[in-house]
Image (cartoon, rainbow, N blue to C red):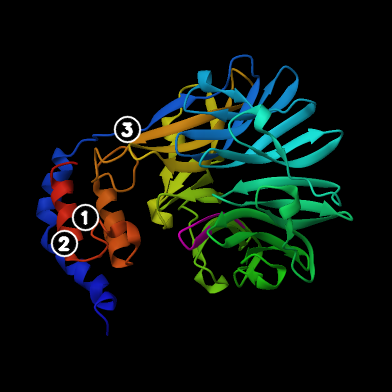
Amino acid sequence: MSHLQTRPSFTENISIAILPLLATALIASTASAQWTLAILNPAGASYSRSFAASGVQQVGEAFVGGTYRASLWEGTSASWVDLNPTDATDSAVFGVKNGQQGGYAAVGGVFRASLWNNSASSWVDLHPAVAISSFVNVVSNTRQGGNVRIDDVDRASLWSGTAATYVDLHPAGASASYVWAIDGESQAGFAVLGEAGHASMWGGSPASHVDLHPSGATESSVYAMSNGQQAGYAIVDDIRRACLWTGTAASWVDLNPVGGAESEVEGMGEGMQVGYAVIDGVVCASLWSGTAASWVNLSAFLPPGFTSSYAWGITSDGANLYVSGYGFSTEMNDDIALLWSLPLGSCTADFNLDGVVDFFDYLDFVDAFSSNLSEADFNGDSVIDFFDYLDFVDAFSLGC
């Protein structure tokens, strides 16, 4: 038996030994960092949504002057940049990475896959000549992924910055397919095989297609990828469940929180996943750290007047963690783009990032430590060992 396989029982024993210490820490601990919320809706907009984030940038769409406009923000409503190209009747951005934005623009009555570099004038048309319509859904450092409609079939697609670089990823036997995520040389999304969408992954060609559809699921899709993991949803036992994969159908992990009527992951990064969960009939923007038990309800930080919310993007600038999305405003009677922010490093014992240091942080750390998850490397030395446990307990006992 390996060292790692013996770890779960080991942590059970030491957790019992330090319970008096933890009880004292629980009494003394206070939150040292709190989530804050910024409303991104630009002046004059009656509707807005943010769909992705990278560094300090957030992207999406806003309805201004009777037009849906591809939109870019940097943390405030005043920072809004209108990316809608000249002659476009509407547009939106679905992906962003390192100062490049991808989405679509409707020009000449055609939805055209589009790429921008921080301004409307930088617009690049990626639409293939043979296509009826096309969309970019995700942007990486060098590539763009999405879907192209040819002969009334939506086909998973890949570009490298120009229309001429278009690659068709549509797998044999599929009636439709889409790319929603890119991680290095891998792409992911879903393909309709038979009567249902199957979570899917590619390595740059149709022949590389991998079916991630879990056994027993009736439908599944990948919407995000990061560090060798894929995330999205699978419908199992008639419940839409947020989930994670690690490259195979059998690796499926259910993230649906206790009490969740349904849930989905829409984005991932920084070792975490974001999306939504329906709890007691309310749609709640949600954050996970790889397990169902790690679920954090980001709707708890909404101001009065918001009745539901979704999280779509997660990123960091090194100083803060950012989660972008949108919520329904009763005042505006529509969705409004939002940005949640949490200072990093100021309170490392807040392991589940809910803004409070409490026993749930300890339970979540032990769960990650026992499962050898990367986030359990508390001291950052690239080794998960007893020193991580000791360092966490030390921070936890101090309330930070």
- Callout 2 amino acid: Phe
Q: Write down the residue under mark 1.
A: 379
The residue drawn where x is 17% and y is 44% is: 26
**Do tag 2 and tag 3 residues touch (Cβ < 8 Å)?**
no
The residue drawn where x is 80% and y is 26% is: 87
Secondary structure under tag 1 reads loop
- Callout 3 amino acid: Gln
Secondary structure under tag 3 reads loop
Q: Is residue 105 covered in magenta?
A: no
- Give the magenta range: 222-230
Nearer-the-camera pick, 229 or 296: 229
Instruction: From the top left corner, tell me how far across and down residue 244 is, in percent.
Output: 50, 60
Instruction: From the top left corner, tell me how far across and down residue 214 is, in percent.
Output: 59, 69
Residue 398 seen by the camera: yes
Query: How far apart, in angstroms, are the residues tagged by discs 1 and 3?
Result: 22 Å
Instruction: From the top left corner, tell me how far across and down residue 232 is, in percent.
Output: 57, 55
Viewer-nearest of discs 2 and 3: 2
Is residue 8 positioned above or below 177 on the image? below
The disc, 1 or 3, on the residue closer to the chain's N-terminal end is 3
Nearer-the-camera pick, 296 or 249: 249
**Do tag 1 and tag 3 residues touch (Cβ < 8 Å)?**
no
Query: How far apart, in angstroms, are the residues tagged by discs 1 and 2?
Result: 8 Å
**Do tag 1 and tag 2 residues touch (Cβ < 8 Å)?**
yes
Residue 233 - label: none
The residue drawn where x is 65% and y is 32% is: 122
Residue 34 - label: 3
The residue drawn where x is 71% and y is 56% is: 157
- Callout 1 amino acid: Asn
Q: Residues within 10 Å of mark 1 (few under 14, many from 20)?
A: some
Q: Farthest residue toward the top?
A: 44
